[in-house]
């Protein structure tokens, strides 16, 4: 009996020791590796007290979501994600993208157009300006290449080094598939200004972006940038780049408006009343880029199912809608084509014009709802 007791004690000590080592490695990793970004300090938190979204030291949704998962919930999600086989989870072959060169971008002067990079990343050309939206050009949506699955396509429509001057970068929130350290680092010498939700500026500053280039905005705040109107509008999501800074920064959708185009970018969001609010206050929209991917019944309030995406397109009064947040990474348990297949069916039922370009295929406002690439 004493021998068994000693063995159990040694096993417990070994487990505790291993946990201790892992904790030390984690803290060393997050404090040394730059991709985790910055931290919102007390002084900065004090400046957010005016925000209706900031309560008890954290940003919150209008609806009380997401709920903090229990340890059992985390185990369940982890087990499913890492061990459950999903049929057609990734394309059998690397996706082909349409290439565009820097000269074609620099010379473009024919109205408003978008170029999609997969997931939620866009180059928007509008009123003679180049705007990047959620520029995630990295191979893996994670703090380190070993910690995530690779992009479905190795090539990008254009490499960062070939991009011309970027007038502004707009960020929806601080998750790795929307705010990428390597992309920001490689872009920063080209960029004039950054527009982000409250708190997200701490990451940019940690990556040596001057604070006078960064404008942080709360929901429903409006500003002008050159000849554009920018509005930070609500989303229903969450934030955080490591275990101990969840909800320390805000998440948002964005309205981008010129004299000749009215655009909406949803960011990441669960379905909610804010879509109708956006439509009533700033719609109708010529073109709405709406989240449609990485959903699951285990997190129904923070990502939309494709049928909800189509309904949200109706709610915001979109003249044409493009499903985004898919086509680049596996971040959920559905097949990689499930988002586009389901949203097309629902959009047709709702008589909502749908835009489905190939990655890199130009989307011109005056040609909407084309392009309509058939995804298989």
Image (tube, grey):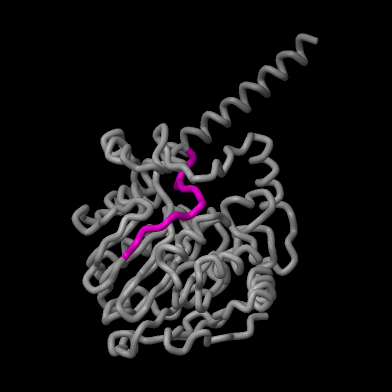
Can residue 196 be seen at all in this image of the molecule?
Answer: yes
Q: Is residue 120 above or below residue 39?
A: below
Residue at 42% from the left image edge and 84% from the top image edge: 365
The residue at 25%/56% (across/down) is 214
Q: Is residue 179 visible?
A: no
x, y percent for residue 238:
49, 48
Q: Main secondary structure of the magenta part?
A: loop
The location of residue 348, given as percent across then percent down, is 66, 78
Residue 231 colored in magenta in the image: yes
Q: Relative to 143, does residue 361 appear above or below in the rendering?
A: below
Q: Is residue 351 left or right of residue 108?
A: right
In-image side of 21 versus 44 (left or right): right
Above or below, comparing residue 32 to residue 110 in the picture: above
Q: How far from the left and from the top, in percent, is residue 335?
A: 69, 67
Residue found at the far front of this picture: 280
Relative image position of residue 331 (x, y in whole percent): 59, 59
Point out the stretch of residues depicted in magenta.
Answer: 230-243
Q: Which residue is situated farthest in the right direction here?
A: 1
Name the image quarter holding residue 312: bottom right
In what quadrant of the picture does the N terminus appear?
Answer: top right
Out of 117 and 20, give the one closest to the viewer. Answer: 117
Let me know if residue 234 is in the magenta part: yes
- The residue shown at (64%, 66%) is 306
Task: Give the answer, above or below, for where 89 lies relative to 10.
Answer: below
Mark count: 0
């Amino acid at each position: 009996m004493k021998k068994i007791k000693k063995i159990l004690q040694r096993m417990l000590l070994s487990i505790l020791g291993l946990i201790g080592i892992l904790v030390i490695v984690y803290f060393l990793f997050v404090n040394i590796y730059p991709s985790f970004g910055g931290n919102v300090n007390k002084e900065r938190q004090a400046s957010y007290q005016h925000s209706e979204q900031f309560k008890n030291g954290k940003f919150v949704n209008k609806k009380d979501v997401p709920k903090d998962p229990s340890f059992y919930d985390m185990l369940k999600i982890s087990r499913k994600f890492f061990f459950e086989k999903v049929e057609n989870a990734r394309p059998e072959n690397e996706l082909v993208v349409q290439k565009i060169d820097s000269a074609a971008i620099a010379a473009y002067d024919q109205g408003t157009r978008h170029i999609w990079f997969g997931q939620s990343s866009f180059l928007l050309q509008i009123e003679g300006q180049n705007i990047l939206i959620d520029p995630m050009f990295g191979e893996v949506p994670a703090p380190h290449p070993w910690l995530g699955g690779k992009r479905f396509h190795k090539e990008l429509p254009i490499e960062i080094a070939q991009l011309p001057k970027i007038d502004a970068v707009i960020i929806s929130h601080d998750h790795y598939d929307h705010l990428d350290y390597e992309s920001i680092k490689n872009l920063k010498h080209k960029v004039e200004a950054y527009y982000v939700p409250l708190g997200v500026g701490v990451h940019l500053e940690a990556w040596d972006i001057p604070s006078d280039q960064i404008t942080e905005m709360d929901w429903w705040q409006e500003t002008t940038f050159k000849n554009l109107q920018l509005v930070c509008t609500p989303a229903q999501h969450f934030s955080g780049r490591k275990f101990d800074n969840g909800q320390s920064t805000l998440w948002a959708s964005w309205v981008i408006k010129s004299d000749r185009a009215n655009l909406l970018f949803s960011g990441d969001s669960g379905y909610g009343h804010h879509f109708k609010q956006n439509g009533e206050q700033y719609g109708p929209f010529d073109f709405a880029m709406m989240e449609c991917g990485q959903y699951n019944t285990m997190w129904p309030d923070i990502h939309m199912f494709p049928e909800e995406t189509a309904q949200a397109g109706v709610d915001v009064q979109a003249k044409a809608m493009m499903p985004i947040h898919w086509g680049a990474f596996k971040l959920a348990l559905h097949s990689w084509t499930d988002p586009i297949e389901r949203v097309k069916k629902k959009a047709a039922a709702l008589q909502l014009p749908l835009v489905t370009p190939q990655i890199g295929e130009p989307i011109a406002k005056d040609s909407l709802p084309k392009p309509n690439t058939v995804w298989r």
